[in-house]
Amino acid sequence: MATLEDPLEIGGCEIPNRLYRAPLLECAGNGPDAVETLIDDLEPAAASGVGLICQGATIVRGEGGCAAPGMTRVNDPKFVSRLSELTDRIHDHGSRIFVQLEHGGLRSMETWHAEFREEHPDLEQLAVSRPPWQLRALDRAGFLHYDPRVLSTEEVYELASDFGRAAAYTADAGYDGIHLSGANMGIVQQFLSPFYNRREDEFGGSPENRLRFLQVVHDEIRERAGDVPLMTKVPAETPAPPIVRRKLSLTDGVEIARRLERIGYDAVVPVQTSVTWDMSIVRGEYPERAWENEAMQEGYATAFGGRWRTRLVAAANRVQSLQYTLEGPWNEDFCRRVREAVSIPVLAEGGIRERAEMDRLLGEGSEDTNPACDMVGMARPFYAEPRLGARLLELEGSRERTRQAENARVLCESCNNCTVPQVTGAPGICRTPSVLRERGELEKAGAYESGRTRRD
């Protein structure tokens, strides 16, 4: 059975260990400081020994498609070429870096961000199909705004080409692989999902046709970027509200993963996610500190279209925090079922918080249960501890597991006070005083020095 320190190969790219930083929103944008912001956010994880860094969702087009403020676009080859400074810095530490490509579709700011809509009145929403009645009801009630243009067949192929071009640009800039944002309500999930996809052309109808967009994206990337390693998230829409009847089950998700392997994808990341933007992907506590922060109130009102709408969103957030509690690795069963069905690497993320959990998911020390995954990742904990890898990975050259690594648990409390302010364009950082104090104590004790530094 594998250990966290064992290497892993994804599509010909050797990852030095099986710990990865899952995609997060870096809020770097495309301005003059974008590259330096990305370096500041991503390099600490590599310096701490993390084997794979997944840069957060980047947008494949020059306008529209952003699910949140501050997302970076990778449609301009001149800008993307500057990102070689980032990839070089990651490689200097022996780590690998994949970039996540995305278009938000109906999840984009064109739908939910009031000020953005006012400033871009001519920017069209892009949709796979006409929005389902549940979303149209939210539109009529004034909670969201849906007035999309449904992509024609030709435009679907053009969108797939944008993914291919972006992949080629990033590969030229030194990225080691491509990670498609196939879940979290983005455009790829919208193609896969029977909730969103009611098309009557070759991209809709049967499960095979709904998967066709990922087939065309794969082909575009292979044609334009060569054999760059390619992986994607695979959704199961099990947390969707009860009024949603047409959705992807766990069995559907397993079958999608099986077909993606046949298409030629090199790895998959199974995740359970809703069909709407809720706390199914950021489970944990109600972020009371963030919602009651007076300095953020104007930003919330600007984003949601007024203070009363802000209060409604906060109330929905409170209800969802009771529904989606943090109970261990919530994608474990899904990952295990996918891993039994495919031979490509399966990456697990979602609620993993202890080294002991990682060992168990990788199958270490267990003779009766097959591993649930081949690699384990975390996202929000890296906001709390940018150099987290140093506490989880063993010392280089050590023959026995260090007590520090074996008993390590992340400081992140899954309180979500880091995520809510991002709707205002605020950076993704930990804002919880108790966590910051404990991190400071660990820093003074040298806990975040890499294994190589401590050994020397």
Image (cartoon, rainbow, N blue to C red):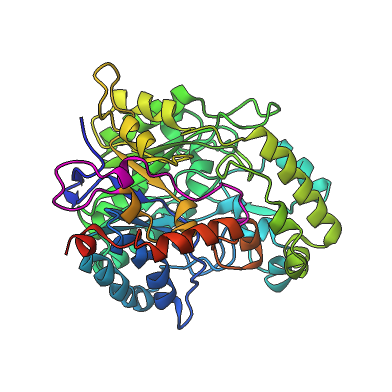
Residue 364 in the image: state x and y as whole percent. 25, 30
The front one of 456 and 329 is 456
| Residue 173 visible from this viewpoint | no
Determine whether, in the image, residue 289 is placed left or right of residue 65: right
* Residue 278: quarter of image: top right
Question: Residue most toward the right?
Answer: 308
Observer able to see residue 189: yes
* Magenta-span inclusion, residue 307: no
Q: Residue most toward the bottom? A: 32
Left or right: 92 as drawn, with respect to 159: left
User: Is 410 inside the magenta-drawn segment?
Assistant: yes
Q: Residue at x 63, y 45 (%)?
A: 277
Residue placed most toward the observer, 147 or 296: 296
Residue 324 appears left or right of 7:
right
The magenta span reads 393-419
In front of the other: 321 or 265: 321
Q: Residue at x 23, y 48 (%)?
A: 17
Above or below, 282 against 365 in this view is below
Dominant SS of magenta comes to: loop
Q: In the rendered image, which quarter contains the C terminus?
A: bottom left
Residue at the location (29% across, 76% down)?
85
| Residue 20 picture location, percent across and down | 33, 50
- Horizontally, residue 11 falls left or right of residue 155, namely left
211 or 344: nearer the eye?
344
Quarter of the picture containing the N terminus is top left
Residue 43 horizontal/vertical position (percent): 34, 67
Residue 429 spot, x, y in % from top left: 54, 63
Q: Number of marks in the image?
A: 0
